Image (tube, rainbow, N blue to C red):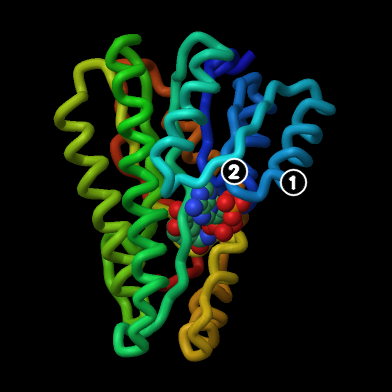
């Protein structure tokens, strides 16, 4: 029996990639997963697949850029299960381009999803966790939270921000709420599909040639949740062994 059986974990961006893989792995371990994303057809299929294997899963339509929707999403989980053990702030977008391409809408989208989305999750979940005197935020950053490369200035800036916010939150609420930053290297998912800049698209093909499956990140997330309540796994970087990046 897993020591995380029965926990309630809400996951943003659960319709593909790391969020989806983590939902499947946690559900296998007896966790109640509550899944949010915009593509509800994907979430519906995922929830059915998890339930067919005897797992517990629910979903809600969620755009993390919308604070009201985030509040509704978190309240849904709280009302259904009476508490929230973990909020996995995972939703993210990565439309890379050189700054001189001036893709201002894409910059704003990254800021809205990758930074504001995480802040919205914190705003919706923190009062509940403070009242419970327990809980854990797991925020997904990136190796781009530690280094910057051409075409990735804004994306890396958003991930540096997620790292800063996570560390600040950990220092402020540390007495009974855990904060974990998980930073993946290149991982199989749909993330690179949002790149509209042709040159950045081409460069990403080489950059993403060596990758690890999304489940590799899910296992790190499970490890952080499995630790006893007085152990905070604050930062984990998981990258392909063979990748120089
Ligand atoms: P995917 O593109 O496969 O998944 C991204 C998820 O985010 C989707 O479920 C998508 O759902 C969701 N999402 C995007 N915009 C919104 C929004 N406005 N509201 C709600 N959900 C949204 O990529 P990954 O699984 O790779 O990405 C997960 C996280 O991992 C991201 O934060 C990413 O930055 C990070 N990461 C990934 C790496 C990789 O190599 N794959 C490396 C480093 C970090 P929908 O479109 O249905 O809303």
Query: First in sequence: mark 1 or mark 2?
Result: 2
Residue beneath disc 1: 41
Point out which mark residue 64 bears. Answer: none
Q: For label 2, count other residues whose C-alpha is less than 10 Å away and answer few (under 14), some (14-19) or many (20+).
A: many
- Element class at badge 2: loop
Task: Identify the image quadrant of residue 109.
Answer: bottom left
* Drawn side of residue 152 relative to residue 201, left or right: left
Residue 106 image position (x, y, % from top left): 41, 71
**In the image shown, does 36 or 2 lie closer to the viewer?**
36
Whether 136 is drawn above or below 40: the answer is above
In the image, the residue with mark 1 has its CB under 8 Å from the nearest atom of ligand 1: no
Relative to 118, is 187 above or below? below
Where, quadrant-wise, is the C terminus in this rendering?
bottom left
Q: Is residue 25 visible?
A: yes
Query: Does the image show residue 214?
Result: no
Query: What residue sits 48% from the left and 90% below the top?
Result: 199
Where's residue 15, x and y in %?
64, 47
Query: Which numbered circle lies on residue 14?
Result: 2
Q: Is mark 2 within 8 Å of ligand 1?
A: yes
Residue pictured at 49% horizontal, 29% vertical: 72
Left-right relation of 240 to 115: right
Q: Residue at x 49, y 77 (%)?
A: 207
Q: Choose between 184 and 117: the one closer to the eye.
A: 117
The secondary element bearing badge 1 is classed as helix
Distance between mark 1 and mark 2 Cα atoms: 12 Å
Quarter occupied by residue 135: top left
Quarter holding the N terminus is top right
Residue 196, percent from left and from top: 52, 80
Q: Are marks 1 and 2 in contact (CB under 8 Å)?
A: no
Query: Residue 105: which quarter of the image?
Result: bottom left
Instruction: Pick whichever, 87 or 187, lies toward us.
Output: 87
């Amino acid at each position: 029996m897993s020591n995380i059986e029965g926990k309630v974990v809400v996951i943003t961006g659960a319709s593909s990639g790391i969020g989806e893989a983590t939902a499947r792995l946690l559900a296998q371990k007896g966790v109640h997963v509550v899944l949010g994303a915009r593509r509800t057809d994907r979430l519906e299929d995922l929830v059915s697949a998890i339930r067919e294997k005897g797992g517990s899963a629910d979903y809600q339509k969620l755009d993390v850029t919308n604070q009201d929707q985030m509040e509704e999403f978190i309240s849904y989980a709280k009302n259904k299960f009476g508490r929230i053990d973990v909020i996995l702030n995972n939703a993210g977008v990565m439309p890379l381009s050189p700054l001189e391409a001036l893709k201002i809408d894409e910059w704003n989208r990254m800021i809205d999803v990758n930074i504001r989305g995480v802040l919205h999750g914190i705003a919706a979940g923190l009062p509940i966790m403070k009242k419970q005197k327990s809980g854990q935020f797991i925020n997904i950053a990136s190796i781009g939270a530690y280094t910057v490369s051409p075409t990735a200035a804004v994306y890396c800036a958003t991930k540096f921000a997620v790292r800063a916010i996570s560390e600040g939150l950990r220092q402020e609420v540390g007495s009974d709420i855990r904060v974990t930053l998980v930073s993946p290297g290149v991982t199989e998912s749909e993330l690179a599909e949002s790149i509209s800049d042709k040159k950045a698209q081409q460069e990403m093909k080489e950059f993403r040639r060596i990758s690890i499956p999304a489940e590799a990140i899910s296992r790190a997330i499970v490890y952080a949740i499995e630790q006893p309540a007085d152990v905070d796994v604050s930062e984990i970087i998981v990258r392909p062994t063979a990748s120089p990046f």
